[in-house]
Amino acid sequence: MEYVLENAALKLTVSSHGAEPVSVVYKATGRECLWQGDKAVWGRHAPILFPYAGKLPEGKLVVDGKEYPGGQHGFARDLEHTLAEQTPDKLVLELASSPETLERFPFPFLLRSTFTLEGNTVHHTLTVENPGSGPLQFGLGYHPAFVCPFDGDHDTQDYEFRFDKLESPLVLKTSAKGLLSGECGYFGTNLDAIPLTDRLFDHDSFCFGNLKSTTLGIYEKGSDRSVVCNIAPFPYTLIWSALSEKIHFVCIEPWHSLPGVEGGSSNWTDQAAAARLAPGESFTTTLSTTFNG
């Protein structure tokens, strides 16, 4: 099922499958801003990463000595979410733990997605609640993909990622298996922008861990067009695109947790967490994305 929120500036479409935004149309120009999930390149749009972001050591998590299989980025993106509320100004979808999820992640939870529009900005708020009788530890992240180039009249080199502060981004490096290698290094020093090239992501994503900026966006050089994410609430931000001869989209991914460590423990309590909630507690975060032109 798909649900629509609309104002004078934007038309947002969200699928109940994964509570995933599947379209953002900038109404003044009719431009589709979200990647449309061409499976020949990358078949998703803007998935939620829960109950962990990235990969786990040996592809599993261990709780009280029992092993549970764990694929990349968790399972919330692949399950049907239930409509909890829909008004002209707000959409709320929920995913509750079930016998199916408990076979993969042995903790009760409630994951709520709340979508609102404010001018040309989409606010996507994620709330995690612990309805259980024991602690709930989880990871969490966003993974939106934005069409780039913005139109057929521009090419990859017409775009750049821009910070709103001068940055020397520290990259948390990963192994060939997508796990943290334990190494880090500077992407560069005293940067306010990263030029986009077709070869930028030949070796996968870049995970930045020390950003001071409030925003990170993809900007079209020489114009007012951009897509800008508020990354201030997040300790980690990744940039990525699928390996391809040409760039078709770029992802700006604010995360509250990290992948597992190469050769590290698979015990769930050893994984980098967004939070550990006591019974009855909740955790809330919001990704705000502004679309210009």
Image (cartoon, rainbow, N blue to C red):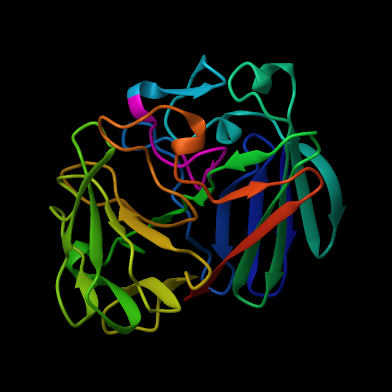
Say whether residue 49 is magenta.
Answer: yes
Q: Is residue 194 left or right of residue 51?
A: left
Residue 198 x/y as whole percent: 16, 54
Q: Can you say whether 18 is above or below 45 in the image?
A: above
> Which of the 4 quarters of the picture holds residue 57?
top left
Q: Residue at x 17, y 67 (%)?
A: 157
> Which of 58/39 is in front?
58
Residue 219 x/y as whole percent: 33, 74
Q: Can you say whether 4 is above or below 65 in the image?
A: below
What secondary structure is the stretch in magenta mostly built from? loop
Residue 137 x/y as whole percent: 60, 41
Q: Residue at x 62, y 66 (%)?
A: 122
Q: Residue at x 49, y 64 (%)?
A: 234
Magenta-colored span: 44-57
Say whether residue 217 is magenta.
Answer: no
Q: Is residue 148 left or right of residue 117?
A: left
